[in-house]
Image (cartoon, rainbow, N blue to C red):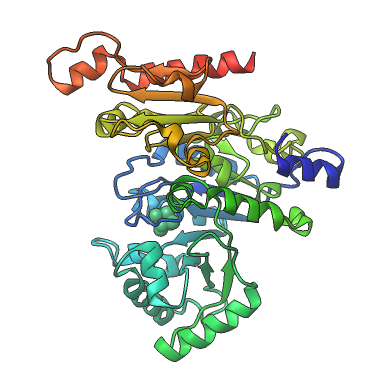
């Protein structure tokens, strides 16, 4: 049982259970025009995962259960080729729809009609703007993002967003580093004043969120040497009053491939719903939203089968081989990938490194470990443990095109997934 679960048991006397499902949050894909350092989903322009129309049709059926809101997210949901078609179908059925936008995508080529389309269909907008200061936005989201975001908000204001009560525009702040957000109401006042003074911009309300140490943000923390401190800060700041409003208690997240998750963070970790509730939109019936298996489903808090990967050398090749091992893979739970070498490239012994560094790389609480190296397996046992999986090459090499060699030596998604599956099964038993 992890610390969070222990707290929950202390407060509720049992686990965390959902209430009535009111919101369907739908991840339309992991592609994004940005690559922010705090992204818990590792979204980027290079991601190809995208919800396809047949899955959308199943979501449309599920939406008929009468939930309060359909919340579209990504990546940048606007980049899904069926974005407009899906919204039209949802609105035709009278479903209220909200889109989470990163703003800058609205200025991408071919997107010029999207703001008007959103207004015509009465879509609510939740837009990321992690600070009212340019330097902070640039540090977190990249150069030029601030200016583009302001341009997009101006366009939305002209259309009535953030002004007309029927066209709400909420802005979202999240911290730029390993710290918590300030109080929402205080920060909202600052945003209003600064946005008005600097640009004459208005918005409906400000939401502040805390970054989860997952995906790219986790890698960023690790890079700063702050992962443990940040986890300690989250532990110390636990607030039992937030339990009733947790997103997992009143919504279901639907991944781009139709997998169902208790929340967006379990989606990032690849932990589908469990405890007897169907975990894919294919086996999900409209009536399920009100059925006890969903209404009172037990929410998964543990990092089931959490697994640490170590990769060294030829990282480009290995990344190619592990392409199919993304969070969207069903059954792939709690993937943590470490690109840093536990053995130093220069041959120095990593045991000579400070303990803090070693702990940040090895994460001692994760004991299910896999190493992948396009080289000898020698030396990996002490890092992955006796039961860990080591994928490497222990015989003489060969000369052939890279793709053929990857296949011959077992550096394929299929082989890696099989080895991980058998490791998880062994651990479980
Ligand atoms: S945080 Fe949002 S805008 Fe940034 S990369 Fe992730 S999905 Fe894209």
Seen from this angle, which residue lies furthest right? 13
Q: Residue at x 35, y 17 (%)?
A: 377
Q: Residue at x 44, y 47 (%)?
A: 219
Seen from this angle, which residue lies furthest top? 395
Quarter holding the N terminus? Answer: top right
Q: Classify 364 as above or below 135.
A: above
Q: Is residue 240 left or right of residue 158?
A: right
Quarter holding the C terminus? Answer: top right
Q: Classify 114 as above or below 223.
A: below
Q: Residue at x 65, y 77 (%)?
A: 185
Q: Is residue 88 visible?
A: no
- At which x and y percent is residue 253? 57, 44
Most foreground residue, 136 or 291: 136
Quarter-of-image position of residue 294: top right
Most foreground residue, 300 or 408: 408
Q: Residue at x 31, y 20 (%)?
A: 411
- At which x and y percent is residue 199? 40, 87
Most foreground residue, 331 or 6: 6
Q: Is residue 328 left or right of residue 113?
A: right
Quarter-of-image position of residue 116: bottom left
- At which x and y percent is residue 280? 56, 31
Q: Is residue 219 visible?
A: yes
Total marks placed: 0
Q: Classify 180 as above or below 28.
A: below
Most foreground residue, 429 or 26: 429
Ligand 1 falls in quadrant: bottom left
- At which x and y percent is residue 345? 30, 33
Quarter-of-image position of residue 179: bottom right
Seen from this angle, which residue lies furthest bottom? 197
């Amino acid at each position: 049982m992890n610390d969070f679960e222990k707290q929950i048991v202390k407060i509720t006397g049992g686990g965390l259970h959902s209430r009535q499902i009111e919101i369907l949050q739908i991840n339309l894909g992991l592609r994004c025009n940005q690559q922010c350092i705090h992204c818990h989903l590792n979204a980027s322009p290079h991601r190809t995962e995208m919800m396809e129309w047949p899955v959308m049709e199943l979501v449309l059926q599920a939406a008929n259960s009468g939930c309060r809101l359909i919340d579209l997210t990504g990546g940048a949901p606007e980049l899904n080729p069926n974005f407009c078609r899906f919204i039209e179908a949802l609105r035709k059925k009278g479903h209220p729809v909200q889109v989470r936008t990163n703003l800058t995508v609205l200025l991408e080529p071919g997107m010029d009609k999207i703001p008007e389309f959103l207004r015509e269909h009465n879509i609510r907008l939740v837009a990321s703007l992690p600070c009212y200061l340019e330097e902070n936005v640039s540090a977190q989201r990249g150069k030029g993002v601030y200016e583009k975001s302001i341009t997009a908000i101006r366009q939305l204001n002209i259309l009535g967003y953030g002004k007309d009560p029927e066209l709400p525009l909420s802005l979202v702040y999240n911290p730029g580093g390993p710290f918590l957000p300030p109080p929402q109401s205080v920060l909202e006042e600052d945003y209003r004043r600064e946005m008005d003074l600097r640009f004459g911009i208005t918005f409906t309300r400000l939401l502040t969120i805390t970054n989860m140490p997952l995906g790219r943000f986790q890698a960023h923390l690790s890079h700063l040497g702050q992962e443990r401190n940040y986890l300690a800060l989250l532990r110390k700041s636990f607030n039992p009053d937030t339990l009733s409003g947790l997103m997992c208690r009143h919504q279901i997240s639907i991944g781009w491939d139709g997998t169902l998750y208790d929340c967006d963070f379990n989606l990032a970790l690849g932990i589908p719903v469990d405890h007897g509730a169907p975990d894919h939109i294919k086996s999900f019936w409209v009536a399920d939203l009100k059925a006890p298996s969903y209404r009172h489903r037990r929410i998964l808090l543990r990092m089931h089968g959490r697994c640490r990967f170590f990769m060294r050398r030829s990282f480009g090749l290995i990344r190619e081989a592990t392409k199919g091992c993304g969070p969207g893979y069903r059954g792939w739970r709690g993937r943590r990938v470490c690109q840093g070498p536990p053995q130093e490239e220069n041959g120095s012994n990593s045991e000579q490194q400070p303990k803090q560094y070693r702990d940040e790389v090895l994460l001692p609480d994760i004991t299910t470990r896999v190493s992948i190296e396009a080289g000898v397996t020698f030396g990996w046992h002490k890092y992955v443990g006796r039961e860990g999986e080591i994928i490497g090459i222990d015989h003489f090499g060969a000369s052939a095109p890279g793709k053929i060699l990857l296949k011959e030596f077992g550096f394929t998604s299929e082989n890696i997934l099989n080895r991980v599956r058998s490791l998880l099964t062994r651990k479980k038993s």
